[in-house]
Amino acid sequence: MAIFEEKREELDNFETRMGVPRGRLAVTMDLMTDAMALVGQHGVYCQSQRWPGKPAMDVQLIMKNLTDAKELIQSVMEELRKKR
């Protein structure tokens, strides 16, 4: 439950504006976006030996999973918006 304490201000803001479920998803999206930026930065320094100029395979897989998860969260937020 530490995340609820750590992100209390952001959660309060988004939950007030969007409702609890969508607000929490919005904060989750922000966290994932931050993680994607960090992975992207790491990919600049951790290059593939096989494909110069591309991130290492593990970095590519992490980025794909984060991108896919973010897309799923966006679809849930859209469904919740429709039900409003």
Image (cartoon, helix red, strand yellow):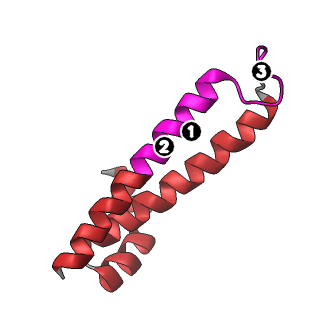
| Viewer-closest of 51 and 67 | 51
Please say if the residues under marks 3 and 1 sit with CB atoms less than 8 Å apart. Answer: no
Q: Which numbered marker is on residue 63?
A: 1
Taking the view exactly as shown, the residue that stands out farthest to the left is: 83
Q: Residue at x 81, y 31 (%)?
A: 45
Q: Secondary structure at mark 3?
A: loop
Q: Between tags 3 and 1, which lies in front?
A: 3
Q: Is residue 3 left or right of residue 79?
A: right
Q: Does the segment drawn in magenta span residue 49? A: yes
Query: Which sits earlier in the primary sequence, circle 2 or circle 3?
Result: 3
Labels 3 and 1: the sequence-earlier one: 3
In the depicted structure, whether residue 77 falls above or below residue 35: below
Residue type indicated by callout 3:
Trp
Label 2 with label 1: CB-CB less than 8 Å: yes
The label on residue 24 is: none
Q: Which residue corresponds to the image point at 52% horizontal and 38% vertical from the top-left?
A: 64
Residue lying furthest top in this view? Answer: 50
Query: Hey, which quadrant is residue 20 in on the image?
Result: bottom left
Q: Quadrant of residue 51?
A: top right
Which class describes the residues within 10 Å of circle 2: few (<14), some (14-19), or many (20+)? some
Residue at the front extreme, as displayed: 51
For the record, the magenta segment spans: 48-70
- 75 in the magenta segment: no
Q: CA distance from mark 2 to mark 1?
A: 5 Å
At which x and y percent is residue 19? 25, 78
Residue with the mark numbered 2: 66
Residue 51 image label: 3
Give the main secondary structure, helix, strand or loop, of the magenta stretch.
helix
Give amino acid for label 1.
Met
